[in-house]
Structure formats: structure tokens, C-alpha cells
Image (cartoon, rainbow, N blue to C red):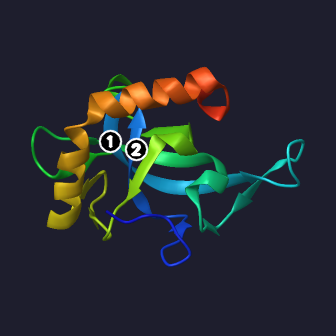
Amino acid sequence: MLRVSHVRLLRVHDFGVILIDGWLTIAKVLALYVKTNGKHGKHASVDDTQTIGAVSYLAVQVFEQFSTLNQFGAMTRATAKFQTFQYALIPSTAFLAVLTGAPKVQVSSITLEDTDWCLYKSLRDQETLFAETIKLFRQRGGPADDLI
């Protein structure tokens, strides 16, 4: 599992594992927002970050797993009736891991490499624990309050 660090920055267009609406899924990072100038600062968009904790929110495109395969579709349960793709603004606490490689991208789906598929499956086995942890973050207050 790759950690976000000075060695491996989190960048716009990276893919990662997220938790949204209690579901573990894959997302493509479209934008990163950080707060500038301390507590009363404004949010600004950045291209990359060394630490996920510095990020207030991430704008992402959500990909939901097809059946039990390592393929994920851009049309999720939340948007299937409208035949559209799903996008979300999530707090940094919902971004769990960066994928090690770039998935194979088709028009409306992605296929994970074997290493990333194993990472996803191991995290999915702990999905309930992650949901409970996010719930604790929300109880503390902060950006996760309204989004998950």
C-alpha cells in the first residue's frame, strides 16, 4: 500500500481507494483543496500534496465494482437511473490509499492491476471498520460532518 509522502505525492489524476456512503470504492482525484493561512484561511486548489492531512477536500470521480471482478464502472448505483457518472467532494479522512499503478482506463470503466486488486480486497475486508472510524471522525467535528 502506498502512503502519501514526500516520496510519493498525492496528485490530481491519481487513483485511490475511498469510502463513500459506507461503501469502499475506487476514485480518480480531480482536484485537491487545502486551507491556506491558518484557521480562518480560504480553501485553494493545489496540484499535489505531501500529506493527506493537509487536504481539506478532494473532488473525485467514483468507480463502483462490477460483481466480483477487478473492474469498476463509472456509472454507480447512485447514478444508474440517470445514466450518468458519479462525482463527489469528500474529506481527506475518506481517502484511504493511493493505488500503486495506473488502472487500465476504458470509456466508462477501469481495470485494476493485480497488486491494486489485492490492496482493494484487503481493505474491503475491513469496510465496516473503516465506516465506524469515519463515523468517529464526524463526531469530533470537521469537514467530514456533511459529506459521508
From the viewer's side, name the closer residue of 103 and 81. Answer: 103
Residue 22: x and y, percent? 37, 26
Q: How many marks?
A: 2
Instruction: Of the two numbered discs 2 and 1 on the same chain, state the one appearing first in sequence.
Output: 2
Location of residue 44 by image quarter:
bottom right
Residue 83: x and y, percent? 35, 32
From the viewer's side, name the closer residue of 23 and 93. Answer: 93
Residue 126: x and y, percent? 25, 36
The kind of residue on which mark 1 rests is Thr
- At 26% from the left and 45% from the top, the residue drawn is 123
The residue that disc 1 covers is 25
The kind of residue on which mark 2 rests is Ile
- At 34% from the left and 23% from the top, the residue drawn is 81
- In-image side of 145 versus 114 (left or right): right
- Depicted 59 relative to depicted 31: above or below: above
Please tell me the numbered disc located at residue 18: 2
Q: Residues within 10 Å of mark 2 (few under 14, many from 20)?
A: many
Q: Residues within 10 Å of mark 1 (few under 14, many from 20)?
A: many
The residue tagged with tag 1: helix, strand or loop?
A: strand
The residue tagged with tag 2: helix, strand or loop?
A: strand
Q: Can residue 21 be spotted in the picture?
A: no
- In-image side of 116 versus 144 (left or right): left
Residue 132: x and y, percent? 39, 25
Location of residue 6 by image quarter:
bottom right
Badge 2 vs badge 1, beta-carbon distance below 8 Å: yes
- Depicted 54 relative to depicted 76: above or below: below
- At 55% from the left and 39% from the top, the residue drawn is 90
Query: The N terminus is located in which quarter?
Result: bottom left
Furthest residue toward bottom: 7
Q: Can residue 63 be spotted in the picture?
A: yes
Residues at marks 2 and 1, CA–CA distance in whole angstroms: 5 Å
